[in-house]
Amino acid sequence: MLDWVSFSQEEFYNVVVDVAQYRHFVPWCTDSVVHGIPRESSAVCSVPEAKGTEISRCISHADLGIGFKAFKETYTSQVISESPWKVQAIAHDASIFRRLVTSWEFIPYTCIPPTTLARLSQRHIMNSKIHADYKCLVRFGIDFELNSVLYSQVADLFFNQVCKEMSHAFTSRCKQVYGQR
């Protein structure tokens, strides 16, 4: 999922990387606790638009609770952040998920090549007129596989809506933290 936001790369990154706050604004998130001190290291950014930029990579662990009606699940995620370009969470110890990987990438408007901007415009991801308000392109994706075939079929019906609601929740959180733009 691609979305233009009126917040800077750093602002959106800071909201997404603050996993401890998820329980306050992420739909269906019932708990979010970060454990220990993150391990920091220098690395080369994996986001293509960063073109091999040296970044600070942090690895931390968080317990996340999710719930919807009678359904409840708690699992641990390894959170890998590449400041301020990317945040990825990989779930472990989840009984319902065989695989769950959530990825966010934050690309400043100034780093997007004109050919990509034209392609995005053709795909109606942005208006044909470039808005001065656009500061950052956010790429958001969830890659998951459930342990139950029945749950997988049900999840497929709602997947796009879940992605939209989660993306909207983070944008709303940015507005709450940084003000309306």
Image (spheres, helix red, strand yellow):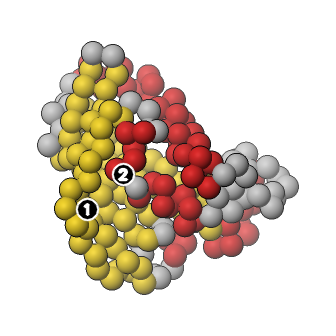
The residue closer to the viewer here, 119 or 45, is 45
CA gap between label 1 and label 2 equals: 10 Å
Pointer 1 local density, CA inside 10 Å: few below 14, some 14–19, many at least 20 = some
In the rendered image, which residue does mark 1 sit on? Answer: 60
Residue under label 2: 19
What type is the residue that disc 2 sits on? Answer: Val
Judge whether 95 appears above or below 93 on screen: above
Q: Position of residue 2 (x, y in %)?
A: 58, 50
Quadrant location of residue 75?
top left
Quadrant position of residue 32: top left
Q: Amino acid at mark 1?
A: Ser
Contact between labelled residues 2 and 1, with CB atoms less than 8 Å apart: yes
Q: Residue 98, can we see it?
A: no
The residue drawn where x is 68% and y is 62% is 135
Q: Residue 164's spot in the image, x, y percent?
A: 54, 36
Q: Secondary structure at mark 2?
A: helix
Give percent across and percent down for residue 174. Answer: 58, 51
Q: Residue at x 51, y 29 (%)?
A: 161
**Which residue sits at x=27%, y=20%?**
71
Q: Residue 73: in sight, yes or no?
A: yes
- Where, by quadrant of the figure, is residue 145 drawn? top left
